[in-house]
């Protein structure tokens, strides 16, 4: 079973099947509590280089892209409104917006 898992998810010969070389996996694991430690431990088990530096770089680039993107709320652009409807859409609360952006801060 271990050989199958290694072949499918941690294949050091094929980067397309290596989660430690996958940008999305590295970013999402790195941002979780204990994620950097877990990446380091998995790399140690597999006798490969620590992917934390790559994860930090990928995450930083992703945050830079988000920082440069224009921020618009659904209520600002009229999304969610049915044409001719008098019902006003309920936009995200300030607390929700703060929670969404807390990782960037």
Image (spheres, helix red, strand yellow):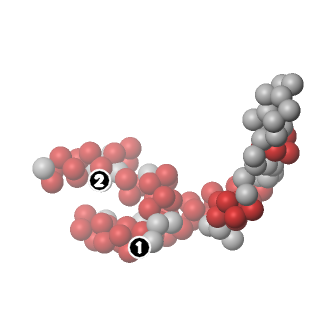
Res 96 → quadrant: bottom right
The residue tagged with tag 2: helix, strand or loop?
loop
**Side (left or right) of 98 relative to 40:** right
In percent of the image, x 35 and y 70: which residue is there? Answer: 38
In percent of the image, x 79 and y 28: which residue is there? Answer: 82
Q: Position of residue 22 (x, y in %)?
A: 44, 52
- Seen from this angle, which residue lies furthest top? 84
In the rendering, which numbered label is found on residue 86? Answer: none
Of badges 1 and 2, the one in the foreground is 1
In percent of the image, x 44 and y 62: which residue is there? Answer: 29
Is the residue under label 2 in contact with that under label 1 (CB below 8 Å)? no
Res 57 → quadrant: bottom right
Quadrant housing the C terminus: bottom right
**Is residue 17 something one can see in this rendering?**
yes
Q: Residues within 10 Å of mark 1 (few under 14, many from 20)?
A: few
In the rendering, which numbered label is found on residue 10? Answer: 2
- Seen from this angle, which residue lies furthest left? 1
**Side (left or right) of 97 relative to 10:** right
Q: Which of these two is toward me, 8 or 94?
A: 94
Badge count: 2
Name the residue carrying label 1.
Answer: 34
Among numbered discs 1 and 2, the one appearing first in the sequence: 2
Q: Position of residue 74 (x, y in %)?
A: 77, 44
Q: Position of residue 41 (x, y in %)?
A: 31, 72
């Amino acid at each position: 079973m271990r050989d199958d898992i290694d072949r499918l998810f941690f294949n050091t010969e094929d980067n397309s099947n290596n989660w430690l070389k996958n940008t999305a996996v590295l970013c999402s694991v790195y941002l979780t509590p204990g994620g950097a430690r877990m990446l380091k431990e998995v790399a140690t088990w597999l006798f490969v280089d620590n992917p934390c530096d790559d994860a930090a770089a990928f995450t930083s680039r992703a945050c830079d892209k988000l920082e440069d993107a224009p921020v618009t709320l659904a209520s600002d652009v009229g999304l969610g409104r049915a044409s001719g409807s008098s019902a006003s859409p309920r936009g995200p609360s300030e607390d929700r917006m703060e929670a969404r952006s807390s990782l960037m801060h």
